[in-house]
Amino acid sequence: MRFATLALLAATRAAGTKSSLGPAALAPQQQRDAAIDALRHHVNEEVEQRHLRDLLEDEARCNACTAEACGLYLDFARQKVTVHTIDLLINVARACNVEEKRDAMFRGEVMNPTENRSVRHVSLRATRGDPYAIEEAQDTLDRVLDFARAVRSRHVRGSSGEALVDVVAIGIGGSSLGPACVHEALASEYASEADGRRLRFIANVDPVETEMALRDLDPASTLVIVISKTFTTKETMLNAALVKTWLGEQYESHMCAVTAAAEKARAFGCERIFGFGDYVGGRYSVWSPVGCLPLALQYGVRPVRELLRGARAMDLHFREAPLSENLPVLLALVGFLNAFIYERDCRAVLPYARALSLFPRYVQQLEMESNGKGVDVEGNALTEPAGEVVFGEAGTPGQHSFYQLLHQVRASRVSRFYPTALSPAGLANACLRRRRDASTARAIAACLREHVRHDARTSGTKRHRCAPRRACASCPASSSASARATARTTTSSSGTFVRRPTRWRSEMTGAGTIIGGARATGRRFR
């Protein structure tokens, strides 16, 4: 979705702190310090004490706090920013050489100095002829899609001659979270393409999970994909051994591997092997055979092609759009502002769409595995937080779980992000759409204090009896929307996070927080 812009910012940590990007990679320390000092002074003097209610009265500001690209619509008007704040944030990004680092990433330069590797997940989404495309990745994708066609058309069958109609993907971390998230997002929209096929994921080492995943499947009609970059991941290999036993003596016809360690996969008994380069981090591998193979087997080639096209569209937007209109950059800058300036070190990702229910888990890994470091690339201990704590839950269940603390505790250090996607069925009715809008944005983000006052006046209830119902009405939040959770908008959304630069590390491969699509009015989310 991401995705990577601000590799940046917190590479600018506090004044005088060494940057994780290294002195040669960034603009002079004084320039960065000056940009951050100007931002901090502006926030302290002009923004921090203002109430969101007042900021939302400024129509020009609200329009400036929206952006749209690749079918995604982002609204961050409920963040504590002004138009001048956005300008100052962009100055900080430029002082950190964000554009130069972005271009270097696309050129394939080393962006991960710790392991001396390039960071080229964008090449997975490229098409032949793109300047940053890798021929090997294109050839592997063709092999993956050809194999998926052969299985779905029943030219490739199991050992007994039965069609392989069910797929079990065994992996953990990036080998599971991304593909499972996209599978969940596409399950409703592409149910006809699935045509009764079943896709299961096994990640937990608890054998009960494996038992439940296999319980109603037939080994004769099941294809197993073992996904491990090194083919040594203990949890994955233990689960693979259990499933291998379940398949029986003819397991070779029912197993394939996605790995960079082909010899180890063959030694395990996998003859069908799909590889990927070490320039792809696990958390970005959903666009590699790690994600494309199980998704193509489940839904066919067309949705996977759309998935890649959506991510490529966001790649091009990230590469070409000016910073002031660049969705990944804007998301990264808002996140930097909340975590680094306002010291809100937690972010809740709260999707109001069934299709996006696994999105918080995926974003959690993207950001927290990327930024989960205690030292910079020079080995110096970090004196500032390396990133935000990301958590989340589907919106409606979350409202009846932990929202009360988020909305009523004034010391809450949590910023919010509300992604939505309208379902193709059940939301065509305008009344239902209005109700959905209310539940996703207005009702949640609205200031309840006014309602409490109204209740007190009209019902005669004493104010102290109403006080427990008040909400903290000046909490930062962003929202996004999409018309439908299609393969293209889903991957554009994910790509936005992926591209949204890692704020506290040298690799421009961080993650972010957005999801959405279809055009909406600026007022819709307020």
Image (cartoon, rainbow, N blue to C red):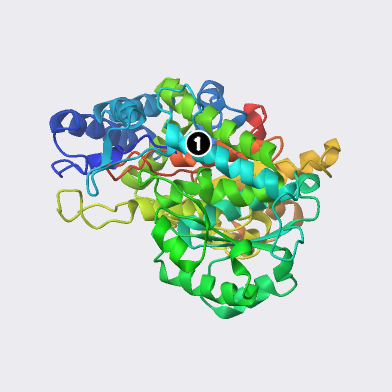
The image position of residue 113, as x and y in percent, is 22, 44
Quarter of the image with the C terminus in it = top right
Q: In which image quadrant can residue 85 be found? A: top left
Horizontal relation, residue 377 to residue 262: left or right: left
Give the residue pinned by disc 1. 139
Where disc 1 sits, the SS reads: helix
Judging depth in this view, the residue of 30 and 294 nearest the camera is 294
- Residue 402, relative to residue 106: is it above or below? below
Q: Which of 424 and 114 is in front in this view?
A: 114
Residue 462 shows in this picture: no
Where is residue 414 drawn, in percent x and y? 45, 53
Residue drawn at 69 percent across, 36 percent down: 302
Residue 518 location (% of width, % of height):
67, 30
Q: Residue 447 at x, y = what percent? A: 60, 46
Residue at 44% x, 66% y is: 267
Name the residue rendered at 63%, 62% in the picture: 253
